[in-house]
Amino acid sequence: MLRTFIFDESKSHWIEEENNLLSHDICAILDEANEIIYLWSGPKNKKGKFRKGYNQVKQLISNFPELNIQIVMSKKNFPIEIKNKIGVLLETVNLGKNKIIKFSRFTTIRIYSISIIATVILPIFSFINLSTSLFWSLSNANYRVSNTIYDIWINNSKIFYFIIVILFSINIIIGLIESESQVIVFSLFGVILSIGLIVFLNQGIFLFLFQEGSTLTNYLISQKDITLFLIQNLSVILIYEIPNIYKLISFFKTYRKFIF
């Protein structure tokens, strides 16, 4: 009987795993019948992690006191059934002929899955916040709004965009770690355009030409100006929102089995 274990570096111990194996992993396959552990290191694995895993093999062996286990690390000495076992595990990361998924770490897959959802949802919330201006009091084709509500309206949107910039920056770091160019490019668009929107919104009361009858505490803004403002914001959001929605869908199609 063959039993498969993968080294969890964050917890510094071996976890039994029979389904998924990434190119970043260290895998120990225990052949109980022949009392041998075959230690496999993925092509993207780092030497430091391999040393940690090797040092913890004794802990794994201690779970089988009835066996006199030997360790084999050279892949050329792996028997065919061990090579086949590894091949089957690695097939779970194949997307087609000679095409392999680019993410190689469970940690980055799970962090990115949360971050990409947030970066898709938050711009929608931000635009909903901006669209609340359509519910302001309307008279003679002008919206009336108090200075307090106006300031909250602008500041809430800036907060949304600040959070979006942070999330996209996290995605860029993940993309660099995993050498995933699509993540880097799409996230870079998000950072640049979100910063542009923050700078735009930072104009505050100078965003609009207030209409006659405005006071220091109540502003009158042309309905046409509000409509144009919303269209401008929506257009910029869609430039980075559409590629990231596409990335969200393709990412979950590929990596959902590693997330749940």
Image: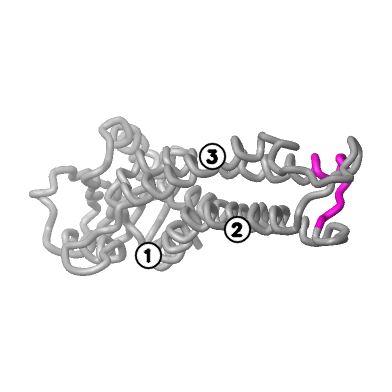
Residue located beneath label 2 in the image: 231
- Tell me what residue is drawn at x 13 percent, y 53 percent: 78
Q: Which x, y percent locates residue 138?
A: 85, 60
**Pointer 1 with pointer 3, Cβ within 8 A:** no
- Tell me what residue is drawn at x 59 percent, y 52 percent: 233
Q: Earlier in the sequence, mark 1 or mark 2?
A: 2
Q: Earlier in the sequence, mark 1 or mark 3?
A: 3
Viewer-closest of 29 and 228: 228
Instruction: Find numbered disc 3 in the image and state the secondary structure of the residue it sits on.
Output: helix
Residue located beneath label 3 in the image: 196
Q: Which x, y percent locates residue 68?
A: 27, 47
Q: Which x, y percent locates residue 54?
A: 30, 36
Q: Is residue 159 above or below residue 91?
A: above
Residue interval drawn in magenta: 142-152
Identify residue type, mark 2. Answer: Ile
Residue located beneath label 1 in the image: 254
Mark 3 vs mark 2, foreground winner is 2
Structural crowding at the residue carrying mark 2, measured as other residues with C-alpha within 10 Å and reported as few (<14), some (14–19) or many (≥20): few
Structural crowding at the residue carrying mark 3, measured as other residues with C-alpha within 10 Å and reported as few (<14), some (14–19) or many (≥20): some
**Residue 214 left/right relative to 236:** right
Instruction: Find numbered disc 2 in the image and state the secondary structure of the residue it sits on.
Output: helix
